[in-house]
Image (tube, helix red, strand yellow):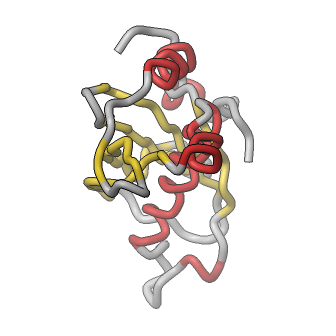
């Protein structure tokens, strides 16, 4: 998995501070030889985790038992993907609320050099022990804005 937009699709993923690269595997396909819809969501999940690692949220999970929960997820499937291929998945934060934040993903097929799906999710910063949302800490807000290169 790489961390920067690949040269094959820089214009499509140039605005995403986190870009990962995943090979399409034979077993990702359904009986119609298209990648199964749940695989797209797993690709987004992996990009989301890499993003959260980069801003230090995984450390908080281990040390403080606080971190993200997924509150909502939607995905628009634009084009079918088939084996063999490599997909490039971008992740970026689009908004920050009190305890929630929105993340957007773009999935690009290397073979087609086209967007094959886009997804949006809402995450909530959560105290796992108390089972309740918490305000997003200022240091995480700052880490997000630093990674994004802008204020949100």
Asked where in the image residue 94 lies, by quadrant, the reply is: top left
Q: Position of residue 122 (x, y in %)?
A: 29, 45
Q: Position of residue 113 (x, y in %)?
A: 54, 43
Q: Nearer the viewer, residue 105 or 63?
A: 63
Compared with 129, 82 (above or below) is below
Image quadrant containing the C terminus:
top left
| Residue at image point 54% right, 69% down | 82
Pick the residue in front: 61 or 117: 61
Residue for point 49% across, 30% down? 12
Q: Residue at x 33, y 57 (%)?
A: 131
Q: Residue furthest bottom?
A: 31
Q: Residue furthest top?
A: 150
Q: Is residue 105 left or right of residue 20?
A: left
Tell me if I can see residue 120 in this picture.
Answer: no
Give residue 132's position: percent from left, percent from top: 29, 51
Seen from the viewer's position, the closer of residues 147 and 143 is 143
Q: Can you name the residue that lies furthest to the right here?
A: 2
Is 15 rendered above or below residue 24?
above
Q: Position of residue 31 (x, y in %)?
A: 46, 90
Q: Is residue 134 above or below residue 17?
A: below
Q: Is residue 3 left or right of residue 55?
A: right
110 left or right of 16 in image: right
Observer-nearest residue: 15 or 42?
42
Q: Quadrant of residue 59?
A: top right
* Residue 20 in which image quadrant: top right
Q: What residue is rendered at 63% in x and 45% in y?
A: 63
In the displayed structure, would residue 94 be above or below residue 32?
above
């Amino acid at each position: 998995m790489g961390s920067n937009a690949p040269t094959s699709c820089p214009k499509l993923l140039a605005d995403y501070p986190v870009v990962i690269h995943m090979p399409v595997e034979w077993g990702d396909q359904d009986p119609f030889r298209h990648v199964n819809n749940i695989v797209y969501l797993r690709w987004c999940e992996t990009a989301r985790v890499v993003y959260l690692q980069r801003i230090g949220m995984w450390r908080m999970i281990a040390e403080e038992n606080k971190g993200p929960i997924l509150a909502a997820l939607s995905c628009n499937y634009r084009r079918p993907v088939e084996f063999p291929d490599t997909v490039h998945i971008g992740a970026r934060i689009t908004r920050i609320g009190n305890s929630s934040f929105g993340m957007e993903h773009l999935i690009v097929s290397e073979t087609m050099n086209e967007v094959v799906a886009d997804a949006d999710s809402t995450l909530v910063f959560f105290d796992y022990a108390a089972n309740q949302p918490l305000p997003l800490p200022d240091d995480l807000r700052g880490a997000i804005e630093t990674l994004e290169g802008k204020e949100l």
